[in-house]
Image (cartoon, grey):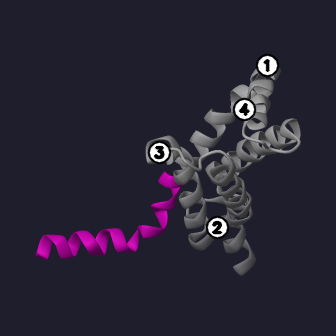
Amino acid sequence: MAFYHQLNLFFDKRKDYGAIFLRLIIGWRLIDGTQDNILSWHRMIEFKDFLQQHGVSYPLMAAWVSVYAQFICGSLYILGYLTRLAAIIMIINFLVALWLVHIGTTFQQSFDALMMLFGSVFFLYYGAGKLSIDNLLVMQKKN
């Protein structure tokens, strides 16, 4: 038990650094999942067609807004900049995605969208953590 107690003390003192791991993987996934739509108009049109099949109004505009929101917010997550604002945008994006596209799909088919949603809820409450631009800006204001 002494070892476990020491382990807890060690990580409790450093727990603010843990958020960077979530920021990196979620940010990377958001960028990776959208960069093909940004780099290829054909892929953007495929996404538009996908949204149109699910009854989304203004599917090209919806595709464009969703893709760029995810790409930009993924970048902000990685940097740890404007993290809570990015989280609000991603919460809205993935609630809409789950409601419009993922209703009736399996847990596995919805897993990425759920991870992005729940990760974003975490960032909304927790913030970016210590290794972030957000934290640097807070520290500068204190000094």
- SS at mark 4? helix
Name the kind of residue labelled 2 in the image: Asn
Q: Residue furthest bottom?
A: 142
Mark in the foreground, 1 or 3: 3
The magenta stretch is: 1-23
Height in image: 96 above or below 14?
A: above
The residue that mark 4 highlights is 50
The residue that mark 3 highlights is 106
Name the kind of residue labelled 1 in the image: His
Of pointers 4 and 1, the one earlier in the residue sequence: 1
Q: What whole-number distance in Å separates the C-alpha atoms at marks 3 and 4?
A: 18 Å
Of pointers 1 and 2, the one earlier in the residue sequence: 1
Of pointers 3 and 2, the one earlier in the residue sequence: 3
Contact check, label 3 and label 2, Cβ < 8 Å: no
Image quadrant holding the C terminus, namely bottom right
In the rendered structure, find residue 42 and report the number of the disc placed on it.
Answer: 1
Question: What residue sits 52% from the left and 52% below the top?
Answer: 115
